Image (cartoon, rainbow, N blue to C red):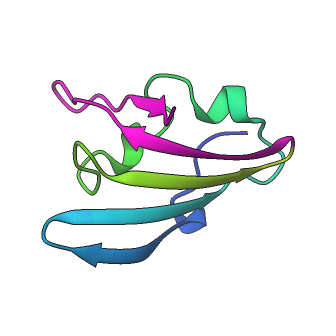
Amino acid sequence: MAFAIRNLSVLAYANGFTLWHYKAGRDQLEQVEALDFFSDASDMLAEGDMMMVSASDGGRVLCVAPLEMGAVATARLA
């Protein structure tokens, strides 16, 4: 499946930082972590935001990585 904006929600916001939740439905974590999966939300996401992802094969916390020209990259938190 593809990114669905209706499945992205804000959990908390303060001082320019946003904690997001994304419910991936049947998508797996590998798909959600792919470069530009969140490109349709690039105008809402900022570098350093964190995203909690619930996917069909588990959950993960991602950090929004540096963005270039509307691209969205995420990285796993260690």
Is residue 63 shown in magenta? yes
Left or right: 28 in relation to 57? left
Q: Quadrant of residue 16?
A: bottom left
Work out whether 40 lies above or below 18: above
Residue occupying the point 38% across, 28% down: 73
* Residue 50: % across, % down: 40, 52
Quadrant where the N terminus sits is: top right
Left or right: 57 in relation to 41? right
Q: Magenta stretch: give its range.
A: 57-78
* Residue 15: % across, % down: 13, 71
* Residue 42: % across, % down: 29, 45
* Residue 78: % across, % down: 51, 32
Residue occupying the point 60% across, 64% down: 7
Residue occupying the point 27% across, 57% down: 44
Left or right: 52 in relation to 43? right
Work out whether 22 lies above or below 66: below
Left or right: 49 in relation to 30? left
Is residue 18 shown in magenta? no
Q: Quadrant of residue 47?
A: top left
Work out whether 12 lies above or below 32: below
Residue occupying the point 31% across, 65% down: 18
Front-most of residues 28 and 59: 59
Q: How many marks?
A: 0
Most distant residue in the front direction: 78
Front-most of residues 43 and 10: 10
